Amino acid sequence: MSQVTMTVNGKEMSGDAEGRTLLSQFLRETLGLTGTHVGCDTSQCGACVVHVDGVAVKACTMLAMEAEGASVDTIEGQAAPDGTLNALQQAFQDHHGLQCGFCTPGMIMSAADLLKNNPQPTEAEVRHHLEGNICRCTGYHNIVKAILAASGQDVSSIAAE
Amino acid sequence: MPKDNGIGASPKRREDVRFLSGTGNYTDDIQVNGQAYVHFLRSDIAHAKINGINLDAASAMPGVIKIFTGADFEGVGGIPCGWQVTDRHGEPMQEPAHPVLAQGKVRYVGDQIAAVVAETLEQARDAAEAIEVDLEELPAVVDMKAALADGATKVHDDLTSNLCYDWGFVEENKPAVDAAFEAAAHVTTLELRNNRLVANPMEPRVAIGDFNRATGDSTLYTTSQNPHVIRLLMGAFVLGIPEHKLRVVAPDVGGGFGTKIFHYAEEAFCTFAAKALNRAVKWTSTRSEAFISDAHGRDHVTKIELALDAENNFTAVRTDTHANMGAYLSTFAPSVPTWLHGTLMAGNYKTPLIYVNVKAVFTNTVPVDAYRGAGRPEATFQLERVVDKAARELGVDPIALRRQNFITEFPYATPVAVEYDTGDYHGTMDALENMADISGFEARRKASEARGMLRGFGVNCYIEACGIAPSNLVGQLGARAGLYESATVRVNATGGLVVMTGSHSHGQGHETSFPQVIAEMIGIDESMVEIVHGDTANTPMGMGTYGSRSIAVGGSAMVRATEKIIAKAKKIAAHLMEAADADIELKDGSFSVAGTDKSVAWGDVTLAAYVPHNYPLEDIEPGLEETAFYDPANFTYPSGAYACEVEVDPETGKVTIEAFNAADDFGNIINPMIVDGQVHGGIGQGIGQALLENASYDENGQLLSASYMDYAMPRASDVPFYGVDHSSQTPCTHNPLGVKGCGEAGAIGSPPAVINAVVDALRSGGHDIHHIDMPVSPSRVWQAMNG
């Protein structure tokens, strides 16, 4: 066990980690930030996407120790301090872009990464970007719609809410 | 103008705020003080005799608390099956013992041999690797027809064969059905497989057992669609714990799709071990583990025949199905290929004679049970595929052939024992034809062909039976449970309401939609209503959420309880206004006396109920809280028509979904936004089944597709935006809301549309193909085109 320290959602946090402890496990179990979810063990599902030094990363593909000194952003840090959802979170609620909510943290963190690098993506670009995020509930319709809406595009012509 | 409150409105989901901000409470988020961790050592051989298990080295490993094997569970009941099917000769099905941990033999890859409880999960895993198991490999039974051959190796030595049951439905109709085929002008025959699927809710299963030695109370936190059912099955049949000493909590649950209905051995293990060790024991499934321990779905092999007369009227349907049960009977497994499948074989058509034969077979594979739709997708797929083939053979338009045979008068008693209360199959087909722009298809096909692509259009109908189910009926059919639902409505002194429901929400949005119903009934804002569910300690008895039953059965129970609340509140209001009970009207949250300008507000009445200073204490009790149990009089019958348009690349065989449209009749709708979302999700899963997903076993019983590297889950780029319409609404006649349920429709209605479209595309390219089995992967399509 060694102590690992990182800045999580703007706050410095420390905890013990084994060499094999994954960042996803460290966030959930050591720091108690259970918003980051683990939906698979092959780095396919994307429920654990967080941002490390501003870059989207599947937290299950990184050891906790590799994040020593890094700045990590998770779903818990996305809303304003008073709880107000950010524009992307709000678009997911407005367009029913989530059902069971399990994949949602990864979807939000992944979509935020897309919009940061490509503020006006096409539908095809959104779908391609979500290749590494699996949702079983929504058939992706309202997730794609929410992300397009969050980018400021008119989604009123897309069939059905 | 759309409503913004009550029935028919689409308020934003209140549960979303916690899910979007990372503050949900899923089972794996729960950490009980002092919890230990369990790792299950699972068989990597499909069928073997256990000659010995040596725990010496493993038990000495760091952090190990105790290692359990089947021997520790000899005095404990097995995992029960909740449905007994009677075969065509009147005999009960063969029902094998299902131990919590394997005893004597392992019967599928994934069967639990031992359970290591340790201080940390890593220590438990490390120790499991040091367990020495002496397995004597036996031939694996994988193929269903081979499993029924003379001399086949038996999955269960104490059963007479691998045949669970041979079910005929309706057995007395068989001679008449056979005669109708003799007399038919045309017979269309199709053999097909309904591919085996893994449900794959994104949240893997989790169980935490806890025990309080001071009180003797056990608690199980589990990822379940129906915590009360788990309490009943595990308490009464496995561990012998009475309900009042056992609490089952299913908090936020990350999707179910059927596979979280069932009572699993891991739940019983954690509850048992917590008591044995006097500390909490937690199990979190990995995804790889989920593939070999969550009950799978579908896996039917069917031959279907359709008889038509000279005018193309359907005269009879005859089917022969083999249904895979896997190695043990999961909770509702026997009901899926029988009562949830055979009863739907009339579909939307007035076929007068139907005979369904189902042979359920044990194999050395993961148990198979209900997955979204459960039996109804299997029925719809075979029926809608054979109708499409018949249209082609007869040279008639597939939509016209369907319309010609539609049931048009309701109620309609089918020859397979169910009575459809309402429907409008022409109405949904009309809506579909409007959406799908059929007249423009030929131009789109030419445009595809100009790019070297094949384009196809497929359509199908579906009917399903939801709102499961009348208890006295399912009792006669072999259910070992009642299928009512209950609700308690508690009105607080200041007028807010709490509804404690036995329905469970794991994505369906009950916390938002259920309050809309009460808001409508009382005329208050839905923010005054809160929904409590998922904990046996604070909700009344419940049968849970599956079979699209929540609003039709759970919602009806809530309505009945609210009606009792309103009746009592009117008495209080009558007293306050010195009027007769019968003259009191409730509108917009205010009670008034008919024909006068006297009124009291909802809040005045609720306050009087709890501060009964001026109150008819001689007639009614203080307080305002009511419970109702609702047992449905019939199933509900949602129906619809779906269309799919595909492009096939003749070079690679890749199928692309170009358009998908769905017209559904769900009766009355509480929240259109949520209903659309349910349909989207079902279509996504149906397209997944048709194009991508397959749980594939090799001849040794190894699951080849046991991770997301190998099992093709639909991704965002595999599907288009969907067109959804539910303007055709024929309300259910026998529940108070006129609702039918919408959870499974998309998954039931979509696979045949996809395959019908793919076959149409290939035939347009000159390929004489009538069927391709799902999933229509590029390699299968390429092989079909290139012989």
Image: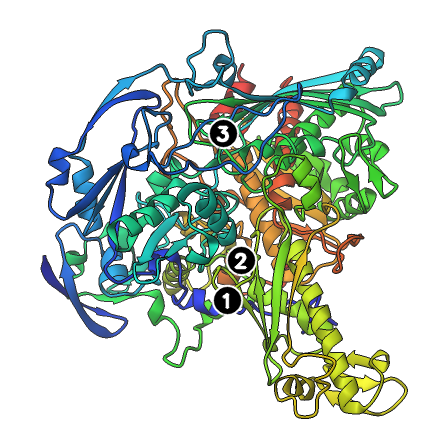
Residue A48: tell me if it is visible.
Answer: no
Neighbour class for label 1 at 10 Å: few (<14), some, many (≥20)? Answer: many
Residue A140 appears at what percent x and percent y? 51, 52
Q: Residue B176 lies in what quarter of the image? A: top right
Say which residue label 3 marks.
Answer: B777
Q: Nearer the viewer, residue B629 or B411?
A: B629
Please, what is the three-letter code of the amino acid marked with disc 1? Glu
Q: Residue B505 got which mark? A: 2
Please, what is the three-letter code of the amino acid marked with disc 3? Ser
**Secondary structure of the residue carrying numbered label 1:** loop
Say which residue label 1 marks.
Answer: B15
Residue B786 appears at what percent x and percent y? 53, 17
Please, what is the three-letter code of the amino acid marked with disc 2? Ser
Looking at the rendered image, the disc whose residue lies closer to the viewer, 3 or 1, is: 1
Residue A129 appears at what percent x and percent y? 41, 52
Chain to which mark 2 belongs: B
**Secondary structure of the residue carrying numbered label 2:** loop
Outermost top residue:
B150
Neighbour class for label 2 at 10 Å: few (<14), some, many (≥20)? Answer: many
Q: Nearer the viewer, residue B326 or B679?
A: B326
Instruction: Specify whether A149 is left or right of B49.
Output: right
